[in-house]
Image (cartoon, rainbow, N blue to C red):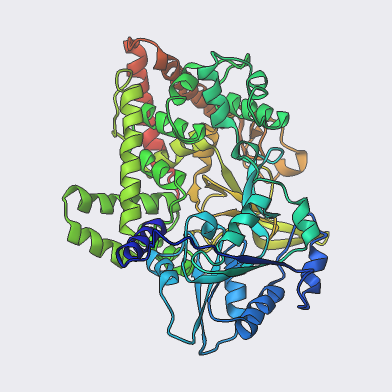
Amino acid sequence: MLILAQARLYLDWVSSGGIRWSTIIIRLSFQHFMDDCKLEVHKTIDMCEDKSPNLVHEDVVKVIKYICDKKPEGAILCFLPGWEDITKVYKMIPERNDLVTYCLHSRLQDSEQWKIFSRPPPGVRKIILATNIAETSVTVDDVVYVVDSGIHKEQRFDVEKGVNCIDNYWISKASAIQRKGRAGRVQPGESYHMYTKEKYKEFEDYSMPEIMRTSLTKIVLDSKVCSNNMNALEFMVKLPTPPEENATLRAVEDLKDLELLDENENLTSLGKTLAEFQLEPSFSKAMVNAVIFKCVTPVVDIVTLFSSETELFSSGLMNKENIKATKSDFCSSSDHLAMMRIFEKFLEFSDANNETGLRMFCKRLNLVPHRMKTIEKLRKIHFDYLFNGLYDVMPIADDYSDNDELVKAVILSGIGNILQHRNWDIVKNRLKQNVNVLLTRNNHKATITQESVNYKRNCFPSEFLLYLNETRSNVRRMTLVRECSLVSQLSVLLFSNKNLNIEKVDDDIKSDISSDDPVKLVLENTTVKLICDRKEAEELIRCKVALMSCYRYYTRQLTNPPEYNKSVNAAWDEILVILNKILKRHQVD
């Protein structure tokens, strides 16, 4: 949207005679480092010694105030790492009649972002607080001064933890040059860099390549197709910037867990099918599983909504409580089902070509219409993947799409991320009871963010919550989950891609169990366990074996001619009828 705005402004300038073909304009940009300035920014200079930078907000404000008080008129563009930094600096800038401050962030609503292009009245200085979105995507032609924090927030994949971590990092020299270039695009300008010359010399020349900071599961899967199943490590070392060896090995193990690679690192039938999809393999697997379990539409909708990083609510940064309230009206225990139902209502207006009703619906729920339409287009692409890849193999059916617990279970079968609730914690070596603690698959404590329907939940009818994405914030030292759904223990046991094992129960626990032969039913390589009667445990294991046997039969058929065993088809239909009834009885609301 900002790029379109920039283009329009440029065209207006051209049409008004802004170009003088016979004139060569030389713009000068003056660059200042903190060791050049006579400002008291000692904390920032000391911070330059740190490998992991932390913004000194008061020093940023000192530089902004210095420009406002000492320099001629002209807008100020200040580069900050993230939204929290923007809000802190915004609050610290003094309220003055001669200053107007705007914020620029990719998740702000379009009307807020457009404000940065407005010209202030004479005698009023404009200040723009922005993330690195303003490095290359946006040109504000009245910016004369740039304040460069030298820091950006970047997401990198932690190979050991298997999770995306977001942290503050020093920018590259190329980024510093880009930021400097924002000063005085159409007139002489000045840039103030919140670091020393020596620190600048230590910067990397360019930003870290994406292949070095993201999960490699999709890349390794694609490499198997184009290299005829070449060993992943051998393939990766041939790239111009090879990723670390352990990152490749991690991707291979993840693909094996998803059953997309066999033990010899060759593509399975399911792997060959999912390689045609452009999504992360776990999301693609959830969609294919939805075909097998006959609940396609809701799963495709949820995958489409949550695989995109598009902010659908216009108040995504400012009013998270309102987002929670809006979603809770559609489902109070599941962000995934809530957003799916909101999207379904949107599609009703779209399918009926009711543009007026669509816009009124979006306005009432604070949705951004053009972003919702983008999701609608992505949804069509994902359905095309399924029809092109699977229609000749098995029908795309919605027989059980009304079973919310099955829908959540199928998503779990592909993505497999579980939060586990407990009502105790260890704080300073002391047991603390009656508290709500959520643990990720890696046994890290997690925090559900404000926009989730499960934020500050006190009642947990199930100890398990399904989630699709998590981010480890090293700055805030916590794992953040923005969307989750309560899911039944039965769904976790039956649909997690792990074996079930029976173990003995400790003697001190047996007295609390009303069974002659209690056992512990454990989900392999996890902390998930159920204490129950041995017969119940054995029945659950037999049920899961039958379920997985039929499921694997169908996934093996994905790359074979569609000649199914009629008896297997009949058995699978019976299993789905029974499974549908059982999961409805165990549905968690």
Q: Is residue 139 left or right of residue 245?
A: left
Is any atom of residue 437 visible in this view? Answer: no
Residue located at (46% from left, 69% from top): 319
Is any atom of residue 533 visible in this view? Answer: yes
Q: Is residue 339 left or right of residue 161?
A: left
Q: Is residue 427 left or right of residue 76?
A: right
* Camera-nearest residue between 380 and 519: 380
Q: Is residue 567 above or below residue 460?
A: above
Residue located at (58% from left, 69% from top): 189
Given the current orientation, which residue lies at the most extreme bottom position? 97
The quadrant where residue 573 appears: top left
Residue located at (56% from left, 14% from top): 229
The quadrant where residue 496 appears: top right
Q: Is residue 180 above or below residue 89?
A: above
* Camera-nearest residue between 377 and 530: 377
Q: Position of residue 434 (x, y in %)?
A: 66, 63
Q: Position of residue 459 (x, y in %)?
A: 53, 60
Q: Quadrant of the N terminus?
A: bottom left
Q: Position of residue 36 (x, y in %)?
A: 77, 70
Total labels drawn? 0
* Camera-nearest residue between 207 and 433: 207
Q: Is residue 78 left or right of residue 4?
A: right
Residue located at (77% from left, 63% from top): 196
Q: Is residue 159 above or below residue 102?
A: above
* Camera-nearest residue between 388 and 174: 174
Q: Position of residue 306 (x, y in %)?
A: 45, 47
